[in-house]
Image (spheres, rainbow, N blue to C red):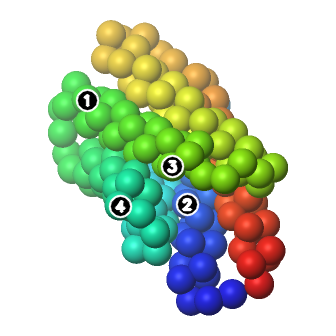
Amino acid sequence: MGRQNNQTLIGSWIVAAGTVASAVNASINANTGDDDEGLNLIGNTLQATGNGVVANDSDSILSASGNIIQAAGNSTIIYSILTDLEKRDDLNLVIKGNLLQALGGLVGFSVTFEADPSLTNAYKLNGELLEVVGNSIQALVAGRELEGIDAGHFSALGSWIQAIGAIIVALAITKQERRRA
């Protein structure tokens, strides 16, 4: 395994760890009614970092762009957590951050879709699609919260769908890299 392949592999597992941290945070908040964002801050920081690492290793401008767009979405959510904003402004940033992540995920999905057909790429496609669906659900939930509707359990659902997708992608990349070794 070369240095670059290690970057993609490590980056994908950093993203997966970040999505799990954010999903745990969303689950805790949904079950306790808290608004604590500690694990979500850690999770989005890990996701942004992992996406940056993968973008650095990308072999195409489209693949790099997808990861950079996802990192921008994570950074938007990080900003919403760290700044003291009105609830409406905070939720608007969360919506935009999740939609950016979904857009970046769709770009990544298109790159994988154009790759050589294989069982591993089929798993990767499914994982990337789950990430897009999870981010989209999270954006919809924030939109509902803008309307004054509590949808915390759906936020946790979207977070876990995204996390499962990220884990599947990391597993698929691990399998690809083991074959190359």
The amino acid on which the numbered mark 2 sits, given as a three-letter code, is Val
- Vertical arrangement, residue 101 with respect to residue 59, above or below: above
Label 3 neighbour load within 10 Å: few <14, some 14-19, many 20+: some
Label 4 neighbour load within 10 Å: few <14, some 14-19, many 20+: few
Picture quadrant where residue 126 is located: top right
Residue at the (28%, 48%) spot, across then down: 76
The residue where tag 4 is placed is: 61
Q: What is the secondary structure assignment of the residue under circle 3?
A: helix
The residue where tag 2 is placed is: 15
* x and y, in percent, of residue 77 in the image: 33, 46
Q: Please tell me whether mark 2 or mark 3 is closer to you in this view.
A: 3
Look at the image and tell me in which quarter the C terminus lies.
Answer: bottom right
Lower sequence index among marks 4 and 1 = 4
Lower sequence index among marks 1 and 2 = 2
Lower sequence index among marks 4 and 3 = 4
Lower sequence index among marks 3 and 1 = 1
Q: Please tell me whether mark 1 or mark 2 is closer to you in this view.
A: 2
Query: CA separation, marks 4 and 2?
Result: 20 Å
Q: Please tell me whether mark 4 or mark 1 is closer to you in this view.
A: 4
In front: 11, or 25? 11
Picture quadrant where residue 122 is located: top right
Lower sequence index among marks 4 and 2 = 2
The residue where tag 3 is placed is: 111
- Vertical arrangement, residue 108 with respect to residue 179, above or below: above
Look at the image and tell me in which quarter the N terminus lies.
Answer: bottom right
Q: Is residue 30 visible?
A: no
Lower sequence index among marks 2 and 3 = 2
Label 2 neighbour load within 10 Å: few <14, some 14-19, many 20+: many
Q: What is the secondary structure assignment of the residue under circle 2?
A: helix
Query: CA separation, marks 2 and 3?
Result: 18 Å
